[in-house]
Image (spheres, rainbow, N blue to C red):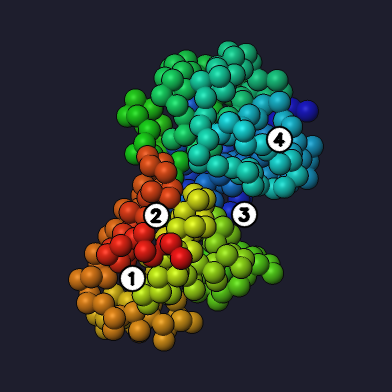
Amino acid sequence: MAVSPQKLKVSFTTLGNDFARRVFSSIVGKEAYAPFYLLEGPEGVGKASLAHQVVAAALCEEENVPCGICPSCTRVRNFQHPDFIVILPEKATLEPGSGHIRPADFSRNQKITIAQVRTIQSEADKPPMEGPRRFVAILDGELMTPEAQNAFLKTLEEPGEAKGSRGSRNVFLMVSAAPNLLPTTILSRARRIRFYSLSLEDFARYDFGERLSVPVPVLHRLSEGSIGRARALLGPEIQHFRKLAVALLSGDTGALATIVATVGRNRDSAEGFLTVYCSFLRDAIVLARGAPEIVVNLDMREDIEGISRKYPVASLENLLRGARGAEEAILERYIPAETALLAGIREMFPRSFHDTVTP
């Protein structure tokens, strides 16, 4: 069925980032699309979800979009619409019916290959199957190999015009938490839409269900307003990480051995532990400086006070810098997670690391 020629009302249900939602509401309402949008900002704040809803709204068959129930919306939700293509890192698989464009097996350790981009090129040369335009969502663009980036650039150079409608025939929606890793040749062709961390008010509206194991304000601060990071942290693992971080900062060498033996072997676990570890260091610093109102781990105040008494502020700041550097290394994937994690906590090492980790 043809897409409705007029969108009377466009509304999105993603949380927060009102500016980005208003921008895309206007674009969909006017049906005036640029060839390439870059949705950039912190991880887990709704970039991919909004991209998915934008496509649903653009292809929806009703006047108030996205309606969520028409055949087109259903096919977009299930990744079955012929004018909607999703590019994920190699080996990641879409989950029809899940309501999420980012699947559970999504991994930043994988790459988007030139073969995948050539598939886009092949489709981009053809007219859309049902409507005036085709939509391509790319998660996460910085995971393209250099060869894939060059191939994508060539695709952008020939966007084509949508017949009988304003704007481009092929609309690319690229999501990225690290746009600095994309070449300037690609960035210069994008209409860049910036996303930000969610406020506590917006964050608290999300239903975490039974997995919520820490107070919402604590989770909001730990995740820095990211629903995605919060979901990754939740469950028994977060409490394990918090206990390990406190034990490590309290001088427990057994905690160091546990971290080396378990956490460092998994990139996601290493990233989750560093998030928690950094939060305790930051809390100890602000507590030592007399700013208890911005402490993150409110429910572990006694432990934080002990840490702030144990170390001078300068030492805590040095530890935090090392941990932040490790977080960056893990995000940008330029060294193994275990190596990054060990580098981030190296100041905690006793004189002989071998004596610490060997019974």
Q: Quadrant of residue 52?
A: top right
Camera-side mark, 1 or 4 = 1
Distance Cα–Cα, label 3 vs label 4: 19 Å
Residue under circle 4?
79
Residue 29 location, x and y as percent? 58, 40
Q: Is residue 165 visible?
A: yes
- Give the residue type at disc 2: Leu
Q: Residue furthest bottom?
A: 302
Q: Earlier in the sequence, mark 2 or mark 3?
A: 3
Q: Quadrant of residue 210?
A: bottom right
- Give the residue type at disc 1: Arg
Q: Are marks 2 and 3 in contact (CB under 8 Å)?
A: no
Q: Are marks 2 and 4 in contact (CB under 8 Å)?
A: no
Residue under circle 3?
13
The one nearer the camera, 189 or 93, is 93
Which residue is pictured at 49% across the width and 73% down the height? 243
- Give the residue type at disc 4: Phe
Which residue is pictured at 59% across the width and 14% down the height? 122
Distance Cα–Cα, label 1 vs label 4: 42 Å
Q: Which mark is residue 282?
A: 1
Q: Earlier in the sequence, mark 1 or mark 2?
A: 1
